[in-house]
Amino acid sequence: MKENKKLAHASLESLYRIFTVPEAPDSTLGRIDQSISQNMAGFLQDHIVASERALALIEKDFSNPFIPEDPSFVSDQIEFLLDKLVAQSVHVASPSFVGHMASALPYFMLPLTRIMTALNQNLVKVETSKAFTPLERQVIGMIHHLIYQQDEDFYTKWMHDRSHAIGSFCSGGTIANLTALWAARNNLFAPSAGFAGLAQEGLAAGMAHFGYRGLAVLVSERGHYSLGKAADILGIGRRNLVAIQTDAHNRIRVDSLAASCDQLQSEGIRVMAIIGVAGSSETGNVDPLNAMADVAQQRGIHFHVDSAWGGPTLFSHKYRTLLAGIERADSVTLDAHKQLYVPMGAGICVFRRPETLSSVEHHAEYIIRKGSKDLGSHSVEGSRPGMAVLVHAGLHIIARSGYELLIDQGIEKACRFADLIKATPDYELITEPELNILTYRYVPQYVRKLLDSEDKALRDRANTLLNSITKSIQKTQRGLGRSFVSRTQLNPERYDRQAIIVFRVVLANPLTTMEILAGILEEQREIAKKDPVLSEMLKLQALERSMQG
Amino acid sequence: MKENKKLAHASLESLYRIFTVPEAPDSTLGRIDQSISQNMAGFLQDHIVASERALALIEKDFSNPFIPEDPSFVSDQIEFLLDKLVAQSVHVASPSFVGHMASALPYFMLPLTRIMTALNQNLVKVETSKAFTPLERQVIGMIHHLIYQQDEDFYTKWMHDRSHAIGSFCSGGTIANLTALWAARNNLFAPSAGFAGLAQEGLAAGMAHFGYRGLAVLVSERGHYSLGKAADILGIGRRNLVAIQTDAHNRIRVDSLAASCDQLQSEGIRVMAIIGVAGSSETGNVDPLNAMADVAQQRGIHFHVDSAWGGPTLFSHKYRTLLAGIERADSVTLDAHKQLYVPMGAGICVFRRPETLSSVEHHAEYIIRKGSKDLGSHSVEGSRPGMAVLVHAGLHIIARSGYELLIDQGIEKACRFADLIKATPDYELITEPELNILTYRYVPQYVRKLLDSEDKALRDRANTLLNSITKSIQKTQRGLGRSFVSRTQLNPERYDRQAIIVFRVVLANPLTTMEILAGILEEQREIAKKDPVLSEMLKLQALERSMQG
């Protein structure tokens, strides 16, 4: 067998070869395939270049907009990708990369993905997925049970029911949140006398029919950005996604939430949904879901919980109470590609009542026919891959007790890291970990006292300088490529809600150790020492001394 | 190394193993992995059970809604999946399965998918994708060029521009169509004096501001069902997706389209978009895009072309003229997981003007910041996998000339199959292939003359019986599992627009031969002969004779 397969002048015969002749084991692609199978971490370590290349330079390798006329050798394309793409990828699986929500993957996910790809099923309908449809319905049922704990009869009746879906499997949390709000909106504008329903007649007709002056969706200021996008897409408007203030722990203020609801409704603005955050992306805090459920229930408002990140905390006997009240939500989002350790592209939205999602049900003639069990009749997406098989495997191979260990070690590691930061004089913990996310920043001791100054202008100037240095440290550390923390901006009460830039750490990778975390602090300190902004700080210190003098 | 990895009572140590120790080559999963790598077709042939199992029986294997407490051995899970899932999957790659829009995959897609999965990049932002973002922008640029043929300067200026996106890569055509209509809607309701734009204020406020009584989207009655769903999601309403009649060739009647536009606008209903179909899902016909572009342009209406299926016809010098006018569209959908031969989950929407997609631009604090090159600022989805690498590989390894061969052989095979059907007395071609899709049905000779009867009741009864037998043959053939055609329902002019059920054949798999197609006709005839409905037909024949007598 020739190593290099190429469609020499694209003959039909050479074309058949790429569909029928496998990559030879000693071909470039065959060798890479083996190497990843045998040592994924080693492959990534060997092929991803640590030090950062400027994006503008990387773009040069991807600047040709013209589709090549003639076929390339497979090996040439693979060499190109290894050299230009893989080398310049982000090492998200590295235990010292603790700024992303993607972590290392269990090994079994790789060969399973190959089975999924080879089968290439399409979950839109049974006819192109057959057993994958029942499997996906089971996965949705399992996640539904994780959250809602209904009895066996419930699932016997509904899980495989041909005219209902108790959830929707999709590509990620953004689509899951959109699905939930789509269903909530359509239920609010359900068909009634003289109105065929919003799905048929549109939003403006619905507003006119029910006499609403406006619509609103309420979520804390820590709500995920996908909610604003959903408000745009669904025609509600970003302005009508009302951000409710959070308390000192980044949790929604339920008194403000209730007051806003009542204020809006008194103005003729219908509150379409209240959204609880169960693991905010930036700080990992969880809203008081039970109290929010009360507010929603008393007013007949759809209650959605976005637990894209935090949902799997329910696996932990010790920490699941953090999410108490989630079982009262009308809909819940959970991302499998986050804390279920599945590769990118798997989210789920589940619904407490089997009929909630019926408000978005749709059919066609050649597909997702009425009465079929096709999952495509209740989903935002159409054609979809069989990612549910990966979730199914995770739920069986890792199981409840395995996921519990992963959750527990993450939260406990976050607590230990928070303790370390608090015990380190030149670091400041900004948000305590509630789940496995925390934020902090580097604050040299001589700046720290400025932060305690009585002079607000001085405090503000110190924070502005710290913002600049935090941003600079984060970029430099990312550029060095040995470790990675992300950064975000918060408005802590302790600094009069001034915008504070912070390092953000997500501790989901079980291979991350305390030694690695201590090393990250050490590296940041070293970077800071060389930072030009620090000289600004020294000037500030001199200024302070002169003021005292 | 132990073959079976299991988290015995889920200890942390055993948990680390699944993240650090690869599947042994002689483990169950290792062996399967090898077997797919070396002989994908053989693996699928060996493991997919041909004869159909009742869905209710399959569901029994996926009926437990409870997440297991204790971990399973990887090998046990894999044995289960082989036996219960793979065995009962649909053999979409088989050359005798010509009813799906998924075909066989080129071999190189499998190891490439492994590289993609191992890297697990997230395309929402550069920080989690790095070189994958420039690569995806290049792929979008290449598809843009395939359609719009702009000059090099255009792509140099826009392809990697940090505040624009000339397209959006997504999970499939449904999301691509949604993206296009989202952008069209928001541009129609752009910010103006006293109005902050629909994205901010919502649809009802926008309608009030511009004084529209209603909104409409126009597409032929052959438009894809995802368009109705988009009309629902975007708040336009399914009723306001106006279906325009098609001609005898399933192409939109442009005179009706223009008349509808003018009628609606005279009633104060703003036509938001006109959608051209370039390869209808059911019949593969292409709307007269140039004439539609005239209608849209004269009236200042967004013109979208859904070429999810037919877009790659542009690779063919011989057939690309079928899509003439597509370059005048404001936005175009193309599915990579269809005729670019990429695994499930890859669609693209491109926009002629770089500023069109800016109407849906959004930002957040910790991600997709303003001024970043993050692709997530212009997409419906959030986190997304790096599927673009598979498209990039296809465009280089198969290249323009290779895709041309694939397109040409598909269309020509469809023509030969159509000729065969027309030459076979007991079959009736319902729609001629324009691309590589055709529809037909089995019509025994003694029924055919009834169809020509002067008596409409008799003709209708014959068609009703044929509908029943077509449906029955299709199901039986699917159940036997040797071959597969799909079915749909059309309303041909020749039968007074009565609903006619037809077999639908999609000829995208290059491995499908004329012998296979002839065999499919033969098998259908054999099935028909055993069908109980046929005895009904014989009765009908007797009835006819008695009427003549």
Image: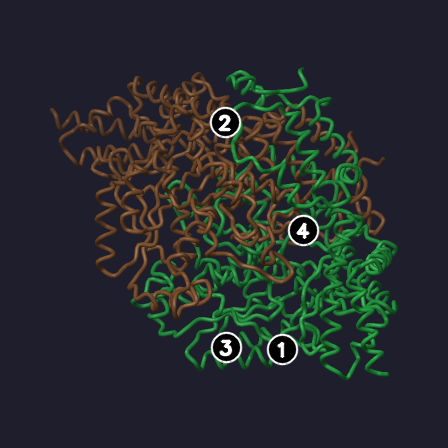
Chain colours: A green, B brown
Which mark's residue is nearer the viewer, 3 or 2? 2
Residues B416 and B319: in front is B319
Which mark's residue is nearer the viewer, 1 or 3? 1
Residues B324 and A265: in front is B324
Disc 4 is placed on an element classified as helix
Image mark 1: chain: A
Of the numbered discs in the image, which one, if any, rests on residue B400? 2
* Total numbered circles: 4
Q: Residues within 10 Å of mark 1 (few under 14, many from 20)?
A: some
Q: Position of residue B9 (x, y in %)?
A: 82, 51
Q: Position of residue A414 (x, y in %)?
A: 79, 62
> Left or right of B19: which side holds B389?
left
Image mark 3: chain: A
Residue denoted by label 4: B127
Residue type, numbered disc 2: Arg
Q: In percent of the image, x 75 and y 77: which residue is there?
A: A459
Q: In percent of the image, x 41 and y 78: which residue is there?
A: A268
Q: CA distance from mark 1 to mark 3?
A: 17 Å
Residues A533 and B166: in front is A533
Residue denoted by label 1: A253
Q: Are marks 4 and 3 on the same chain?
A: no
Residue type, numbered disc 3: Arg
Residue denoted by label 3: A299
Q: CA distance from mark 1 to mark 4?
A: 32 Å
Disc 2 is placed on an element classified as helix
Which mark's residue is nearer the viewer, 1 or 4? 4
Quadrant containing the C terminus of chain B in the rendered view: top left
